[in-house]
């Protein structure tokens, strides 16, 4: 089936486990607040995920959100692949008929659709939980800025750590399309001076060249600090998902857009507890 979604490894289960724990706690914590609660899944998939060998099927984020005991007032699902969006619509129509009136499925790009959603909702009366679960570098930094401006969204972002590391060549010979991609992912050009320095060794022609000067820990810290520049509160220890060689492939980051300190404390307390507990 063309619209079938395959999962990457055990970390996919871990990711969804962390996310669903937060989702349940979020709905419980906001139960008695007067705000409308909105769920936004910007890389929604089909609702189901199949293991690579086809032997195992697990619930994807969309199914998890729709299945929660406490409900959101509104569900937005964004999916760029029209076949997957259609499969998701079918799942809603057949298995979640009782929620159909609350669901909007948008077949399009996450950045564009999310910006429209951020602009269209009156955030004085709404709060949202957002899941950014891209395969790679699809989330533009400006999208995070738009999300933060709402001052009303809690976001889980699967940051594409390995994809970024691969783009950052050791010898500093960066293709212009790669530079564009990194600028879009990190928001501006600052990373060039942060990550590269002049090589103290002279080359054959007696001139200096540029070399990469950031390690894995430094890059992790940089991403955390950048998120902190945009969001008023960010979980200090994102979950690091690793491949079989133990290299980090994604950072699962949590950030809060609310400027209300009590709301930040509550959200961070729940997220930090889940991140610590689910090892
Ligand atoms: C990692 S999967 C998401 C899995 C999903 N969260 C789940 O748990 O089932 C990423 C999804 O994003 C979709 N996608 C890729 N680029 C996109 C974009 N620019 N905007 C929206 N969706 C996109 C892919 O088709 C894929 O279904």
Image (cartoon, grey):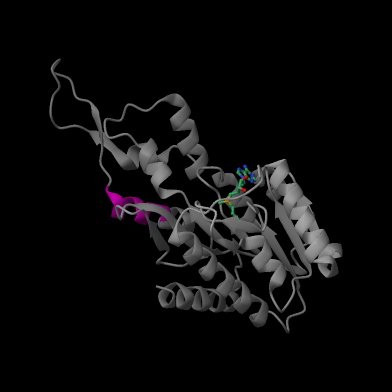
Residue 61's quadrant in the figure?
Answer: bottom right
Residues shaded magenta: 215-223
Residue toward you, 51 or 242: 51
Count of numbered circles in the view: 0
Residue drawn at x 79%, y 55% as measured from the top left: 90
| The quadrant where residue 164 appears | top left
- Relative to 96, is 224 on the left or the right? left
The structure residue drawn at horizontal position 67% and vertical position 53%, both measured from the top left corner, is 46
Pinpoint residue 1: horizontal percent, then vertical percent. 66, 45
Which residue is most to the right?
Answer: 101
Residue 57: x and y in percent read 58, 61
The residue positioned farthest toward the bottom in the image shown: 32
Q: Is residue 24 left or right of residue 113?
A: left
Q: Kindly identify the residue that appears in the image at 58 percent across and 71 percent down.
A: 20
Can residue 73 be seen from the camera position used here?
Answer: yes
Residue at image point 53% right, 47% down: 135
Find residue 269 and report its horizontal and vertical position in percent.
50, 78
Front residue of 187/245: it is: 245
- Rendered-image quadrant of the C terminus: bottom left
In the rendered image, is residue 119 in sight? Answer: no
Q: Main secondary structure of the magenta part?
A: helix
Instruction: Establish if 32 lies above or below 123.
Output: below
Q: Is residue 218 magenta?
A: yes
Magenta span includes 209: no
Q: Residue 144 versus residue 178: which sits nearer the camera?
A: 178
In the displayed structure, would residue 165 be above or below residue 14?
above
Position of residue 26 measured from the top left corner of the image (x, y, whole percent): 63, 76
Residue at the top extreme, as displayed: 205
């Amino acid at each position: 089936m063309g619209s079938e979604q395959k999962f990457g490894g055990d970390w996919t289960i871990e990711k969804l486990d962390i996310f669903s724990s937060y989702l349940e706690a979020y709905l419980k914590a906001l139960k008695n607040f007067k705000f409308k609660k909105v769920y936004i899944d910007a890389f929604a998939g089909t609702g189901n995920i199949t293991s690579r060998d086809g032997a195992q099927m697990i619930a994807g984020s969309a199914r998890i959100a729709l299945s929660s005991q406490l409900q959101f007032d509104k569900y937005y699902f964004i999916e760029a692949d029209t076949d997957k969006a259609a499969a998701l619509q079918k799942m809603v129509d057949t298995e979640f008929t009782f929620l159909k009136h609350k669901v909007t499925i948008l077949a399009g790009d996450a950045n564009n659709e999310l910006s429209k959603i951020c602009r269209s909702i009156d955030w004085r009366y709404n709060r949202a939980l957002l899941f950014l679960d891209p395969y790679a570098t699809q989330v533009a930094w400006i999208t995070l800025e738009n999300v933060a401006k709402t001052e009303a969204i809690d976001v889980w972002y699967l940051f594409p750590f390995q994809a970024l590391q691969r783009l950052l060549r050791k010898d500093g010979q960066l293709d212009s399309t790669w530079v564009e991609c990194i600028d879009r992912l990190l928001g501006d050009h600052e990373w060039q001076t942060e990550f590269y320095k002049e090589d103290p060794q002279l080359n054959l022609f007696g001139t200096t060249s540029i070399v990469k000067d950031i390690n894995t820990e430094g890059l992790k810290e940089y991403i955390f600090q950048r998120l902190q520049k945009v969001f008023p509160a960010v979980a200090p220890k994102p979950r690091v998902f690793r491949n079989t060689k133990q290299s980090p492939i994604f950072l699962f980051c949590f950030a809060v857009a609310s400027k209300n300190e009590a709301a930040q404390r509550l959200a961070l307390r729940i997220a930090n507890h889940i991140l610590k507990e689910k090892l």
